[in-house]
């Protein structure tokens, strides 16, 4: 069995929000995080929390990747939220490509760290 990275992407979770989903290593499917509480002292953890990403860290890395000091300074001093800032610059598509590739890479690493088989799609 394998999990698709695109499915993990759909269920991505953020580190500043509660954990809603976990992964069932026996059934190879995403399920409710409440199942994490059903595990006793079993050394094999059937249910594992899905990866939680730090979206603000990814946003900061994206701005840095543009290699524009003025833009970085503007971003760090603006009152606009990230999405409004990116929209104002017309970088929505570029941002989405960067974001989806970065999160997919993090998901792959998470799978490998948890010995999960995955497929790219």
Image (cartoon, helix red, strand yellow):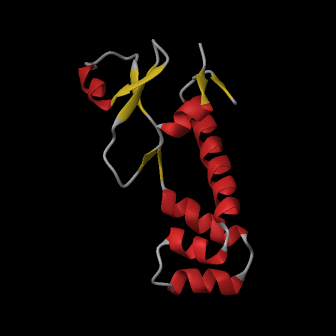
Q: Quadrant of the C terminus?
A: top right
> Residue 33's quadrant in the figure?
top left
How far across and down, in percent of the image, does residue 23 sit?
43, 26
The residue drawn where x is 30% and y is 27% is: 36
Residue in the foreground of this view, choosing between 85 and 108: 85
> Residue 61's quadrant in the figure?
bottom right
Residue in the foreground of this view, choosing between 103 and 97: 97
How far across and down, in percent of the image, does residue 45 sit?
39, 20
How far across and down, in percent of the image, does residue 26 sit?
45, 12
Residue 42 lies left or right of residue 104; in this view the side is left
Image mark count = 0
Give the vertical position of 7 relative to 116 (above or below): below
Give the vertical position of 9 relative to 30 (above or below): below
The residue drawn where x is 37% and y is 17% is: 43
- As drawn, which residue projects farthest toward the right? 67
Give the vertical position of 5 relative to 86 (above or below): above
Q: Quadrant of the N terminus?
A: top right
Give the vertical position of 83 relative to 36 (above or below): below
The residue drawn where x is 47% and y is 79% is: 80
The residue drawn where x is 60% and y is 18% is: 2
How far across and down, in percent of the image, does residue 34 sit?
26, 29
Residue in the foreground of this view, choosing between 110 and 92: 92
């Amino acid at each position: 069995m394998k999990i698709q990275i695109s499915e993990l992407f759909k269920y991505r979770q953020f580190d500043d929000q509660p954990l809603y989903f976990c992964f069932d290593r026996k059934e190879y499917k995403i399920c409710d995080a409440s199942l994490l509480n059903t595990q006793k002292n079993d050394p094999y953890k059937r249910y594992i929390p899905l990866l939680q990403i730090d979206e603000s860290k990814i946003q900061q890395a994206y701005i840095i990747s543009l290699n524009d000091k003025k833009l970085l300074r503007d971003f760090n001093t603006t009152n606009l939220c990230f999405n409004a800032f990116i929209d104002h610059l017309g970088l929505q598509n570029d941002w989405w490509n960067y974001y989806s590739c970065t999160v997919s890479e993090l998901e792959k690493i998470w799978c490998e760290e948890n010995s999960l088989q995955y497929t790219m799609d």
